[in-house]
Image (cartoon, coloured by chain):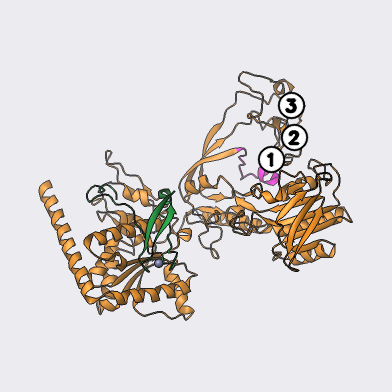
Chain colours: A orange, B green
Amino acid sequence: MMDVSRHPNIELITYAQVENIAGFIGNFTATIRKKTKYVDEKECTACGDCVKVCPVLVPDEFQQGFSSRRAIYIPFPQAVPSSYLIDMDNCLGTNPIACGKCKPACEKKCIDYDSRDEIITIDVGAVVVATGLKPYDPRPLDEYGYTRYENVITSIEFERLNAAGGPTQGHFIRPSDRKEPGSVGFIQCVGSRSKVRGHGYCSNICCMNTIKDSLLLQEHYPGIETSVFYLDIRAFGKGFEELYRKSREQGTKYIRGLPGEIREHHETNNLVLTVENTTTGKIELHEFDMIVLSVGVEPDKDSDKIKSMLSLSRTPDGFFLESHPRLKPVEVPTRGVFMAGFAEGPKDIKDSVCQAGAAASKVSNLLGAGKVRIEAVTSSIDEDLCTMCGRCVRVCPYNAITKSNKKANILPGIIEAACAGCGACGVECDYGAITMRHFTDAQYYSQVEAVLADKPGEKIVVFACNWCSYAGGDLAGTSRMSYPSSPHLIRTMCSARVNMDFVKHALKLGAPIVVVSGCHFSDCHYIDAVKNTQKRVEKLWDELEDLGIRPERVQLEWISAAEGAKFARVMKELELLRKQVTPKEIEETKRILIEAEKKKRGKKAAKKTVST
Amino acid sequence: MALENFHCLRCNHKYKAEFSKKEWPRELTCPKCKSNSVRWLKKRAAKGAGKKDS
Ligand SMILES: [Zn+2]
């Protein structure tokens, strides 16, 4: 942190909140609320004279409440810049001044009660999201008695109790009687790997953290009894297995099974836990002086705000979704935005450092080049056809279309550097004013016509998105999974590019079944463009039903690139559906759709005549 | 949360499930055949009344 604060090219803004980020790659504007500290951080020498006179005592958050701090304080010992700040929520008040003792105590005259938050804006070329983590709060797991029993602590509290700069100067004592414990039990996976008891994912860091803690206790307090209750130990990194072995060799017992209950002995405050040892299949009772809950981690609660600001997507477990899990692990779908650390998923320090380095080098490549190379697949607006209705602006997941204004006669504009080419805008436009380069409507109609030129009744038209469904089909093929030959794939970049008129065109040309297929919602490559697909297909089902066509003729399926087997299964199911569609039904559908089109054209012509 | 009607257009399975309209649109999966061709049978406005919805 010191190095960062001294670096000539880094401006460190602490005690601040990002209120908004607007713009696009190379041209972001960040609006930041710089909260007031009521202390001039440049002048403060951290002498501590103000602290001596502050009468307010509150639990110290950094020390997990094991010690207290004053209302004027430094958040943690290594904070940069090293200057005091007033916690106004706990200060006795400055308007009117209720106490005011710190101000005269400050020789350098750094304290200003009238200072206010400052809103600053900064132009930046790229953004790195590193919002970190929040430890799991084990209070809902009542069986462990956390907060009911003083000697049940979390792994975070354990860190503070063992830190030289902690509330006990590094002497590990149990909270109930301030005595050194003779035995400590660690319970793993608290809030992890269970959807009903926390989160379904593995928090990645807890196993090694416990192994490290057990070694630390064994080294500092020879003879201490340490036991670890676990589901399985995940020691997969470099040197990790060796540490695990060392921990066992030094005497830590590893018992496979998670305790069902902890009870406190009312006289000794010792803790007795009941566990099924799954290795022996027996119920066991174990008594400890202290129990450490190895808590899992969660995404930071502020990630919701960041998500909407930067148009990010999230995986079902709440972490931000990367552009590609293997090839673009620090990029997000919004160009110019990168991420590092826990924001992307649970990881240890080493992986976080690697990711931070990768994100920094990506940013430096981007800013160093001064220009970006973008895909040619972007949208363009025909100004003569645009009616400035604004629908395209609303569906763009990237905010890549500037707002139109009918009154001021301002047309919407495509920011090509921000457009990712999903095509959701073009489909939304009823006036044909938006063209998608390389994936035009005319190209799609031609492909549909080509597929159905010969024996259309034997074919299934499948619109498959490039990143997931099409790749899923590829996987099915390369894995030599067999599926019928009736499905004919038409590739789109995103399923949101599929205009329902393409689907109707296919039905009109005699397709028995038409399929719209895209990415699962959680891994849509265009943030959440796939939502448009769901809405449009829903609307088409209603429309077909109203016309007297079975909605079943249009099928919807989300297939990921890894779901080759699902692709093959779905294609087999669709073939069965296709066989149920009779030639008579196909002909009837054609007639209905041609008729409906005629009617629509007639209405449009009548409208034109009236208006002219 | 309200109980809403759903219809699988793959296996014809009809079912009710708790569903919040705020979550819409979201991925639906038929509990019987696992297909995503699941139609939410929402109460539709009388013809002509819902024209504003687009
Ligand atoms: Zn079904």
* Chain label for disc 2: A
Of the numbered discs 1 and 2, the one sitting upstream in the chain is: 2
* Chain label for disc 1: A
Crowd band around label 2 with a 10 angstrom C-alpha radius: few (<14), some (14–19), many (20+): some
In the rendering, at what x and y percent does residue A326 appear?
55, 65
Q: Amino acid at mark 1?
A: Val
Crowd band around label 1 with a 10 angstrom C-alpha radius: few (<14), some (14–19), many (20+): some
Q: Is residue A31 magenta?
A: no
In the rendering, at what x and y percent does residue A509 appear?
23, 71
Residue at numbered disc 2: A68
Q: Mark 1 or mark 3: which is in front?
A: 3
* Residue beneath the point at 72% across and 52% down: A293
Give the CA separation, mark 1 to mark 3: 19 Å
Helix, strand or loop for the magenta stretch, by majority: loop
Residue at numbered disc 3: A50
Q: Are marks 1 and 2 in contact (CB under 8 Å)?
A: no
Secondary element under disc 3, as helix, strand or loop, is: helix
In the image, the residue with mark 3 has its CB under 8 Å from the nearest atom of ligand 1? no
In the rendering, at what x and y percent does residue A298 appear?
61, 51
| Residue A377 seen | no
Give the CA separation, mark 1 to mark 2: 21 Å
In the image, the residue with mark 1 has its CB under 8 Å from the nearest atom of ligand 1? no
Q: Amino acid at mark 3?
A: Cys
Q: Nearer the viewer, residue A375 or A70?
A: A70
Residue at numbered disc 1: A80
Give the CA separation, mark 2 to mark 3: 16 Å
Task: Give the residues drawn in magenta, as a range.
Answer: A1-15
In this image, A574 relative to A180: left or right?
A: left
Q: Are marks 1 and 3 in contact (CB under 8 Å)?
A: no
Of the numbered discs 2 and 3, the one sitting upstream in the chain is: 3
Q: Amino acid at mark 2?
A: Ser
